[in-house]
Amino acid sequence: MSTGPVVSLRGAVSLLGRFPALAGADLDVQPGEVVLLQGPNGAGKSTLLRLCAGLAPLSDGSATVLDLDLASRSDRRRVRTRVGLLGHATSLYDELTVQANVEFWTRGLVDSDDLDAVMDRLGVGGRLRDVRVGALSAGQRRRTSLSVLVARRPQLWLLDEPHAGLDAAGRDLIDDLVRQAADQGATAIVASHESDRVEGLATRVVNVVGGQVFDAD
Amino acid sequence: MLTDARAIALKDLRVEAASRVLTAQVLPFGMLVLILFGFGIPPDRRVLAAEGDVSRSVLEQVAPGLFWLAVLFSALLAVNRSFAVESVDGNLDALKLVGFDPAGIFLGKAAAIAVQLVALEIVVGIGAFLVYGPPLGDVILLVATVAATTLAVAFAGIVYGALGAGQRLRDTLVPLLLLPVLAPVLLAATRATESALFGPSSSGWPWVGFLGAFSLLYLGAGIVSFGSLLEEA
């Protein structure tokens, strides 16, 4: 197993259309770190997370995630299956039940007992299993989406405003899950405007401004 | 690939069954198209058949073409719908993230569309027989025509649906891309159906062969290119 950085960006540029959402970002994230990304709206935090997930294009510079080169299409596809991204969207089908959604997105690769345990912990087990996602509250949708991420046990957690839409218990649960994942060797990058809350979790804080990354010191 | 295809097909069919878009919108749309075409054509004029000495009404004569037009227009709705459910709430990104084989996604979506089209063709077909009243000729040729056309429309529809996926103008872009491509399919399906209904059957099989070749072409194109199409979506 590699002991190098889980994420290594050097002059990474990601163009969204013609707009450089990332404009020469440099960042190293070591295994087990929990890195807080903070910065104003439009600074490039979400794009940085999507780049690390293999979704946003690497237009220039270099970027490796989990020792895979994001410039290579085949590596990018492999990265996607090893990371867990919780973005602004919940990525659920309104017409399907909670159970059907979680089973579909985990592709039947997770033992059903483990899946039940995760769903119960996230508060979407029990009677909610058979409820269509379209009938859930925003917080319950977020918890369902998080169930998929947790059940897939990604090596790298990429969380974009993970506390958004959650009640106090849900926000505490997110913190616990990130701590537990880090204890078990996973790495996490969290973009959040709730710096006070996430700083307690984070091993390092970086600022994202104008598509570039700076240490917060 | 086939495991992924099965998962995608089942998911799409479950989403459609739950949303009832097929039964509440696509099927009524197909029937409406069929009936409105019927209103536009006088039913009592008799014309000579192009072949042989059997005369048949204009409605009977145009029934195959109108049936397939109704199916194609309805298929556009189904194809758009297949990608609309992926374009909301980040589902397209999630499909990439969980590592489904792109060829499996293509086959699964095409299979789901094919199942919906068969349901549509049965209902609209019954409607066409009731409205236009053509004779039921060579059933084997008719079934082969329906099967080959269904696959052709499903495979090409998913390829071009993916081209439009994620685009702001998807609803209008997909018909603009797909209808010209399906023009030869419409022609072949109509000719083969005419032969199945009115004879001679022998003249219909080459058209079925063309539809089979078209299906195979888009099956291959979809399997090879769907990963790239998804990347661009």
Image (spheres, rainbow, N blue to C red):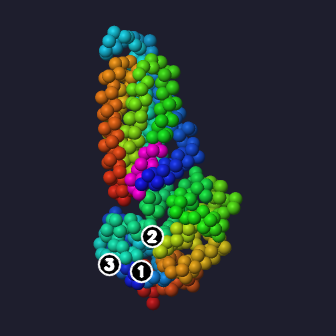
Residue B81 lies left or right of residue A61; in this view the side is right
Task: Please tell me whether residue B100 is drawn above or below residue B15 in the rendered image.
Answer: below
Q: Is disc 3 placed on a helix, strand or loop? A: strand
Label ID, residue A11:
3
Q: Which callout, 1 or 3, points at the residue further toward the start of the chain?
A: 1
Q: Amino acid at mark 1?
A: Met
Q: How many marks?
A: 3
Q: Main secondary structure of the magenta part?
A: helix
Question: What residue would you read off at disc 1?
Answer: A1
Task: Tell me the distance, in whole angstroms, between the alpha carbons under discs 2 and 1.
Answer: 14 Å
Q: Position of residue B155 (x, y in %)?
A: 38, 43
Crowding near the residue tagged with mark 1, few <14, some 14–19, many ≥20 C-alpha atoms within 10 Å: few
Q: Nearer the viewer, mark 2 or mark 3?
A: 2
Label 1 to label 3: alpha-carbon separation: 26 Å
Q: Which mark is residue A82?
A: 2
Q: Are marks 1 and 3 in contact (CB under 8 Å)?
A: no
In this picture, is A61 found above or below B208?
below
Give the residue displayed 49% in from the left and 55% down from the top: B88
Residue B228 higher or lower than A200, as above or below: above
Would you say B125 lies left or right of B190 here? Answer: right
Type of residue at label 2? Arg
Range shown magenta: B101-113
